Amino acid sequence: MKVQLENITLAYGDAVAIKDLSVDIADGESLVLLGKSGCGKTSTMRCVAGLETPLSGRITIGDTVVFDSERRVDVPPNKRNVGMVFQSYAVWPHRTIFHNVAFSLRQQKLPKAEIRERVRDVLDLVGLTEFADRGASLLSGGQMQRVALARSLVMRPSVLLLDEPLSNLDARLRDRLRVELREIQQRLSLTCVYVTHDQSEALALADRIALMQNGRIVQIDRPEKIYDAPFSASIADFLGVSNIFPCTRVASRENLSVLGLTGHDVEVLSRSLPTGPEGAAEGSGAADPADPATPRVCIRPEDIRLLTEPLPEGGNNWLGKVEVVSFQGSYVRYRVGLKGGPELDALVPRHGSALLPVGTPVWATAEPTAVQVLPAEVPA
Amino acid sequence: MTAAIARLRRALPTGVLLLGLATLVIVPMLFILLAAFSTEVPRPGSIGLDALSLENFEVLSTSQAMGALGNSVFIAGAASLVALAIGCGLAFLAARTDAPARRLLYFTGIAPLFLPSLVGALAWSLLGSPATGFLNLLLHGVGLDMTLDIYSRPGLIMILALYYAPYAFLLVHSALSLMNPDLEEAAFVHGGTRRHTLRRITFPLAMPAILGSGILIFALTMENFPVAQVIGNPGQVDTLPSFIYRLMNASPSRGNEAAAVAVVLTAVLLVVTAIQQRAVLRRKFTTVTGKGVKAKLIPLGRWRWPAFAAAMVYFALAVVLPVTALLIAALQNSPYIASLGQLTDADALSFYSLGEMLTSEDLLQAARNSVLTAVLAGLIGTAISFAISYTVYRTNAPGRRVLEFVAMSPLAVPAIVLGLGLLWTWLVAPIPVYGTMAVLVVAFLAVFLPQGYRGVSASILQVDRDLEDSAVLLGSPRAKAVSYVTLPLMRVGMVSTLLLLLMLCMRELSAALFLFTSDTRLLSILIFDNYDNGAMQGAACVSLLYCGVILVIALLAKSLGAKTVEGSR
Amino acid sequence: MTRVTRTGEAGRTRRGRVTAAALAAAALGLAAACAPPPSVDVVDAEQASVDTSDGLVVDGERIADAELFAAATDEGSLSLYSGYVENSEKEVIKAFEHDTGIDVELVRLVPNRLAERVLSEQGAGRLGADVVRTSDYDIASRMRDAGVFEAHEVPDYDQLDDTVRYHGGEFYRVFNPLYTFAYNTVLVDEEDAPTSWWDLTEAEWRGELGITQIGAGGSSLTLNRFQEETLGEDFLPALADQEPRIFDSSSAALESLARGEVAVATGVVSSVNIAASKNAPVNFVIPDEGMAAYDYFVGKTSSARHEAAAELFVDWNLSRRGGDVFRQIGEFPARDDLTPPEVLGQTLPTLASGGVVRIDPRVLLDHAATDQRRWLGLFGYL
């Protein structure tokens, strides 16, 4: 079912957790709330569940208004038919798996036979069929996660909320469950709200990603759109862009911008135009790097190539020296100290070639189209 | 309008709780204050602000009052130092060294808890009274010309230290044994010698526990009444609690002056408790949780056996000798003996009196009363503690911090003072509670509220809030979620708290001192009453039984895996 | 502890442990003989012959008529709030229950706590007592002022003088405990025992004496007044010079006396009597200068729910039979038609002989504050 949040504001005492937040989630859509801890993403989810009471705003699930500060509607959590998988799983350790999963159905006083059948079906779905009578305290993390999921799915929730459900698992299990989760969500065409601080998880699970900072959604879009065109340097930073430098615009050349890195004697060519506040990038060379208005140059490490010769046709050509080499299997991560410039992070596919030893002089390059100029933050 | 109603509904449970706690704790204190600044003792029909005066505080300017204050501070200070030395030493031996029979050492550390200080004091007055104390008879019997006089400041200090050392032992023992061995190993690896590591790493890490328990013991010994009365009074050593008792029992009763002294005692304790709470809070940062890895034992070398012997001396002084003395006193046919040899005479000892006492209606009634009040106070106390803990930790009801503060406040109020306040409260209250068992239950609820609250809240904090929330999201009403998920998961914590309260109530004397009447006597009161009426043999008989009951509760608690004694203040 | 060195302490402990263990073992073995210790009943309730065919007649004395006795029996029980020594009160109750078959529910508190409770309950209009017994004229008067008592005339009302009946029968003086001094019979031979109060100020008793603090109750005040009036004002300073041990209550003093902590202590005849009956090596002295008698009062309450039983109890207390029970305990009955008790083989002097001095309650009251202050000053006590 569709879920609608309108102008939600939530505060704990004096600390405002969510500021005037609005978002529409379509029926069957998987929305990922992505952000650092403390950005308000979990609070937003808990508002939907009814575990937090916003100061103001309205929440609608399907056609039912479950919360409306003006009309004093506040449907208690147990009447909202919202499923939730907690970060801690919250699987009751003193009950068997069957009892955990059957809880909501018993609460609805369904016939025993139906309960058994639905529990079996959902345990099949998450692959725990033979564990039904096991005590929940004996499960591994992955199994607990599945029980938590099954427990929520069995009640056929209007919307399923998942609060960092994979963060307590090891990396390999995380990868596998991520795919499983996505598959189940798509198969059941569940409306999902998924909270995470892990960008790769967000990219893999989302129909849309809502990026949250300081209690606001700063960018909401399809995963690939956000990946390609973050609104700000801090979003880019969050999405894994590790080369971010404050800059000033020096000149335009053809349809490229020439940018000077603040405090360094290096020029960067970019095809994109600064999207920051009007004219900010046009300012003098004395721009303050700490000033959020100062635009940032952002280059993904995988967009940087390391060459032994400079590119003949010009463009971005920076001379530097390899300072750190870190072998990562199919990729090698280098840190290159640019001559008269900052250190640059480069993620280079290996293709069987030998690693560059520390101290090797290299030419680093990046396509002007891969160089984005972004404001530090999305303006409030 | 609706907003106001909604807010009211949200605040209602907290309001009801606050109101209940205020009647339990705050109102009695107000009565103490009122009495202290008034010329009339609160009584139905004579309560009001028209008799205000400061003259009660004149009693404080008497040399006796100043002496009592000085004694209280000096004795509590000295007793805490000695108790700390004993407790820390034993804890170190039991937790971190290769001393022999370390389980026995552990038992030695906690065993004196099974002898309430009242019993310990009675036993020591049998052992160490100057003319006919058993130990003095022994000294004279072997031809030594010295007499120890337990009725003195050093005597008081020794007895208090003996019976409060377990508090230091427990806290320091757990700090030492939970200490992450990595921290010490890190010191070794970086070239620290054993001695150096102990001094620079181990003790500083245990310091908050040591300090915290030291201050705790100071507060406890400061407000201790039974030892002060039984040991201090014959030696004319007054402390503030015994001073309050005497003023109350003077004829005519000097309740207003007693209240004035009570205000002073509470003020001193308030400061001490504030310091202690800060020490406890700081401890939270430094308590280094172990991964269950045992820290390395420190070899004692040639000090192994001497250290063990020292521990056994403590065991003898705190447990063996007192229990023996009580047993002899319970069996003696005549209260007087001129030498220990007399005890081997044919008619010297008999189980007759003990048997008489143990089957007497007085004792049975007191035992019934004790068990009934303790169980009721335990159950209700645990329930109230749960309600408070739940409100504080699981809701964002307004006023929950105040609630927590009020729940912890009895820590700063000496039991004897709270008892006094409760006396006046329930004398004046329109509900006929005074003189019944109910008032004793109320007193115990009030006095042990902090222990109950601390026990339950520690337990509720261990149960993830999500567990309950998930039940609610799955369609269950909140109350059902609590009973289906939260309460079952808190079972051990709740049972421990219940048993802790049970144990504390069984041991308590001071709070009930002004509240009992002859038909609502508890075991502790019966002992004190017997002592007060000069029936030492009766007191000894009941004491033995009393220790037995407490031991049974403690064993029960231990078998349920409860950390019973730890929460005692 | 003052004279013990550290080494001494350790040595004492080790030896103490060994000996104590041995003693415990010996005790267990010996005590297989569970024979009761030699003790005697203080009051032999069974001795009295009771006839209830027409009212209550005990040993030929008619205590209640048929109507009152029947009503009291119907009520079946009564509630007594008492400040009297618990063991003694229980002896009294045992005799009363034997004679009448009416149960007495006892609430016992020391007199000033009792006053506190009675006045509070009275103030709240829910006094639970049918009968109140207390020492101290002052306390009884305060209760009376609060409306606790209701006048009731006992059968022999007209024969009683005004030191016995008060306010038309609101309360009565029933008996007087006698305050004297006692000694430990093992530590002190009978012929060496002090025989007069002034003997106590002799050098040989220095440090051997126990006394009770003046705040302990009306008994202490009475003894004090007696000492001031009969022995002269030099006596207390002389006593203070003896550095006696001061006890909080007379029962604590007696207990220490029995254990031999002190050789001689001030004490009450009846308490000494009861202690001796329980095999304590104590005896009291009838001093040459006499001894002090303090008052115990009893009265029926205005809110009595067992009215007949309450009246019967008061009547019984003031009867010759009641007086006799108090005599057996060792108290001095208020009725002047009874001979003084014989306690532990000693016949107590009569009031007329001057050997027993009762202080008039008003005199006591007038001097209470000054006496207390003087005493506290002399003995350096609060």
Image (cartoon, grey):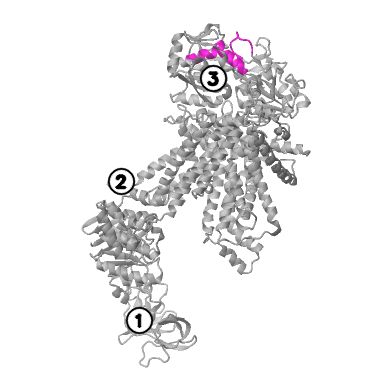
Q: As displayed, is residue A321 above or below residue B79?
A: below
Q: Are marks 2 and 3 in contact (CB under 8 Å)?
A: no
Residue B286 relative to residue A148: left or right:
right
Give the label, 1 or 3, closer to the camera. Answer: 3
Quadrant hosting residue B188: bottom right
Q: For residue B303: magenta?
A: no
Instruction: Calculate the distance from the C-alpha at mark 2 to the C-alpha at mark 1.
Output: 56 Å
Instruction: Calculate the distance from the C-alpha at mark 2 to the C-alpha at mark 3.
Output: 65 Å
The answer to whether residue C210 of the structure is visible from this angle is yes
Give the x, y percent position of residue B408.
48, 45
Q: As displayed, is residue B38 above or below residue B116?
A: above
- Mark seen at residue B4: 2
Q: As displayed, is residue C54 above or below residue C289?
A: above
Label 2 lies in what chain? B
Q: For residue C321: magenta?
A: yes
Give the x, y percent position of residue B86.
64, 49
Residue highlighted by disc 3: C94
Q: Nearer the viewer, residue C152 or A185?
A: A185
Q: Nearer the viewer, residue A309 or B169?
A: B169
Give the x, y percent position of residue A115.
27, 56
- Mark seen at residue B160: none
Residue range highlighted in magenta: C311-340
Q: Nearer the viewer, residue A334 or B100?
A: B100
The answer to whether residue B55 of the structure is visible from this angle is no
Disc 1 is placed on an element classified as loop
- Mark seen at residue A371: 1
Q: Residue at x 37, y 70 (%)?
A: A174
